[in-house]
Image (tube, rainbow, N blue to C red):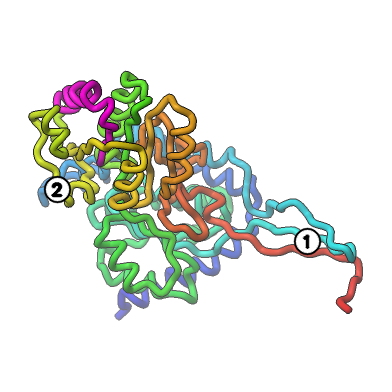
Amino acid sequence: MTTIFDAIQQIGRQARQAARAVMRASSAQKSHALHAMADALFEQRATLKAANHLDLEAAKARALDAALLDRLTLSDRSIDLMIEGLRQIAAMPDPVGELTATKIRPNGMQVAQMRVPLGVIGIIYESRPNVTIDAAALCLKSGNAAILRGGSEALHSNLALGTIVSHGLKAAGLPETAVQVIDTPDRAAVGALITMTEFVDVIIPRGGKSLIKRLSEEARVPMIKHLDGNCHVYVDQFADLSMAVDVAFNAKTYRYGVCGAMETLLVHQAVASSFLPEIARALIAHGVELRGCTQTQALVPQALAATDDDWATEYLGPILAIRVVDSMPEAIAHIERWGSGHTESIVTSHISQAQQFQREVDSSSVYVNLPTCFADGFEYGLGAEIGISTNRLHARGPVGLEGLTTLKWILQGDGQTRG
């Protein structure tokens, strides 16, 4: 009887073999596959939404929270965005084979680096079925094979999307095993995937702290990981307060469940009395619960008292922590103490304040006068993203095509010998 481990091993073998074919595939062939996937998504919209409906009904029966249901839902808009993302990735320059500038050594030897695929990428994710398309497209365009393991709550959606991906690969003459969706919700499948060093080159997890903790403890395959998105917006004493209201409101309410949603609002004490009542009215009217420091509570009576847990929490819901600070260094210190290294923003009209904030805040993305919900590879012009890395090595921030490749050295000579 075939075990889960044996089944995942077979998937790994197939991925390793397919990776050679994808690595050699031409840009035209990969683009053909991506456009065929986009066409299939458009044509099979009803079938896909029916599969997603099964997942949503099961999630509701399990009383899963509203934020998870939002991430799980495949609306017409989200399907249209997947189609647009596929076509955008197809149109982007192929990173595989790209050469750095060549250096000529004193002996005439030419030295450069070539961008090449990582190989086989295992992606483990929760809730969001659109990750299946984003991951498949980015891995294919960057010349990698992919093994995808989505959350059990999105199993029907992911399998339906996997069928669409297989259609696109087949249409372009590429092995359908170049992208494989694991079809079992058994946790043992993850355990097998993250230890298959002979078949998998890197693991990219997208999920909550419990998933990342488990993978960090058990994985033998290297990981590009994304921890939580405890994101901050700091309203500086030199901020345009009208702009600050717009930025802060959008950062929190664009979508509560995205990792770039603002979870803590920091406000300079010089503008707190003017700014906080106005932003509080807008947020409360939108159904956001506020939790604040004592100064915040004095200005916003509806705010509950904030605790250290509030500063540390990624709510992924309609709750916002607010703190009044005496200076920008205090705001930066708060971010350093409580932030997750994801995305932070300052609202200011003072260029030196903006430059200092961007220089000193140690997160993967640091903005000026923008809401943190722009933390998305699509918005960065990457076409889509495989995730947002809070690592410092290899890739940081939204991981697009270049983040899924590495470099090898390319040397050329005309018979030089080393003396």
Mark 1: which amino acid?
A: Val
Dot 1 lies on which element?
A: strand
2 or 1: mark nearer the eye:
2
User: In the displayed structure, does residue 311 sit left or right of residue 9?
Assistant: left
> At which x and y percent is residue 333?
33, 47
Task: Tell which of 89 and 35 is nearer to you.
Answer: 89
User: In the displayed structure, does residue 225 sit left or right of residue 291?
Assistant: right
Q: CA distance from mark 2 to mark 1?
A: 56 Å
Magenta segment: does it hold 275?
yes
The kind of secondary structure the magenta stretch mainly shows is helix
Mark 2: which amino acid?
A: Thr
Task: Tell which of 59 and 48 is nearer to you.
Answer: 59
Task: Tell which of 282 and 253 is nearer to you.
Answer: 282
The residue located at (44%, 48%) in the rendering is 364
Question: Which image quadrant is residue 65 in?
Answer: top left
> At which x and y percent is residue 39?
47, 37
Magenta span of residues = 264-285
> At which x and y percent is residue 104?
84, 58
Above or below — where is 294 with respect to 217?
Answer: above
